Image: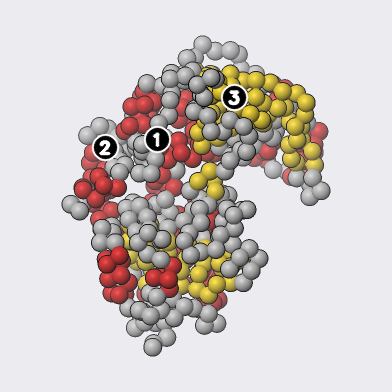
Amino acid sequence: MSHPGTLACPLKVAIVGAGPSGFYTAEHLLKQWGDRVGVDIFDRLPTPYGLVRGGVAPDHQKIKTVTRVYDRIAARPNVRFFGNVELGTHLTIDDLRNCYHQITLSTGAQTDRNLGIPGEALRGSHAATEFVAWYNGHPDYRERQFNLSGQRAAVLGVGNVAVDVTRILSRRPEELARTDIADYALKALRQSRIRELWLLGRRGPAQAAFTNPEIKELGELPEVDTVVLPEEVELDPLSREFLERSGDSSIEKKINILRSYSTRKAGRNPRRLTIRFLVSPVEIRGDEKGKVKSLRLVRNELYATDSGTLRPRPTNNFEELSVDLVFRSVGYRGVALPGVPFDEKRGVIPNDKGRVLDSPGGNPIRGVYAAGWIKRGPLGVIGTNKPDALETVNCMVEDFASGAVLVPQYAGIVESEELVRRKQPRYVSFEDWRRLDDIEVARGLKLGRPRLKLTSVEDMLSALGR
């Protein structure tokens, strides 16, 4: 058999997951090998782009323009997209081993972490990840129901996802009607009666994970009074010391933005958003019908760990906050893939710089790699996936040089497509996706919106005549 990595016998690579990390992995492979590599990108949904399509907030359209980069990658003649193909349902990891020299898993982090407190399962208590996927038109979540008839909602967490949820709940429907938010979500939000929101963080303002543009945007929402309690935005001695030691001007700017909210006079806007710090939920309480009625909170104080980081610990001060709805935004978590090792504790595939290990701390598995959130956990923004993918591809290049690649039974380009066609005849190519994209954009144009999404797999396949 010819040695892979030549024009006559390209290196064949399968990438499972068509989000940012999958496309950046493909980009780095193309830079390294050019026409001497053939890249097939698989995704269980008919649509590419992962969280750019299903996670980026609809009122942040500019961020979504990154897909133009991915489009250029997918347009390369040696790159193919196989959508509506799921690992474990249509193909197995052994199927991929039989067709590819290397396999990269970039499936992201699709579920949420639990708080581990009483009342999480009450009606009206939701994972923020589900709400985000719902309003973005993700096919798995389009049937979810969110009762927005109450007037008070709390969002637990102060990361960018928590801020996104808060902002979508706070925006006027007229603003959302100019975005690509799912049509059913727009209809539900038009009828929302939520008038008071709380964004709750367990640590102090200096440790808040949201970015400065995100928190600044909250303070500029039309018809919303955004406030911070003055005593909660003042830094404790440990935080002041941390800030002085870090010399991070962005944190200083963040504190100044929050302080400006703490000095605002009470307004008469129809909605009010209160941002709180150093409070943790210890219980979600329900009424006699099993519906959320309040949050029991504990006040926290910060302490320094042996490593020098600041962590919260509870005090003996408690309070109760009356709410009708709770969104838990305490982090994403990866999902195990059939036939692939998984680190249950961390919620990732065990790996060393991208090389998949047979167990946490174990030995590398030949020819199998990971990239993105399923590799490192749900950390960073879209751009963080580019250097992360490069680290993985560097390992792939090193292993190729040493001969540590898979020896597929079927090394031809045609055989892998025939395998997919046999296992999943309703697969979606990138040309098919372009047709769907045109359909969505045309539907949106009629309404003055960037696009009107197709939110069910069957609707997508029907639009393609399948």
Inspect this view and state whether residue 453 appears. Answer: yes
Farthest front residue in view? 288
Q: Dot 2, how many residues are within 10 Å of its Cα: few (below 14), some (14-19), or many (20+)?
A: some
Residue under numbered circle 1? 144
| Count of numbered marks | 3
Task: Determine the residue positioned at 35% across, 29% down.
Answer: 186
> Colour scheme used in the picture?
secondary structure
Q: Residue 84: percent from the left, percent from the top?
A: 32, 55
Residue 454, by quadrant, is top left
Confirm or deny contact between disc 1 and disc 3 (CB under 8 A).
no
- The disc, 1 or 3, on the residue closer to the chain's N-terminal end is 1
Residue 419, by quadrant, is bottom left
Q: Secondary structure at mark 2?
A: helix
Farthest bottom residue in view? 1
Q: Which mark is residue 219?
A: none
Q: Nearer the viewer, residue 213 or 135?
A: 135
Q: Nearer the viewer, residue 303 or 131?
A: 131
Q: Which mark is residue 285?
A: 3
In this rendering, the label closer to the viewer, 2 or 1: 1
Q: Residue 15: percent from the left, percent from the top?
A: 42, 64
Q: In the displayed structure, does residue 210 sit left or right of residue 150? A: right
Q: Secondary structure at mark 3?
A: strand
Q: Is residue 233 above or below residue 332?
A: above
- The disc, 2 or 3, on the residue closer to the chain's N-terminal end is 3
Q: Is residue 263 above or below residue 64?
A: above
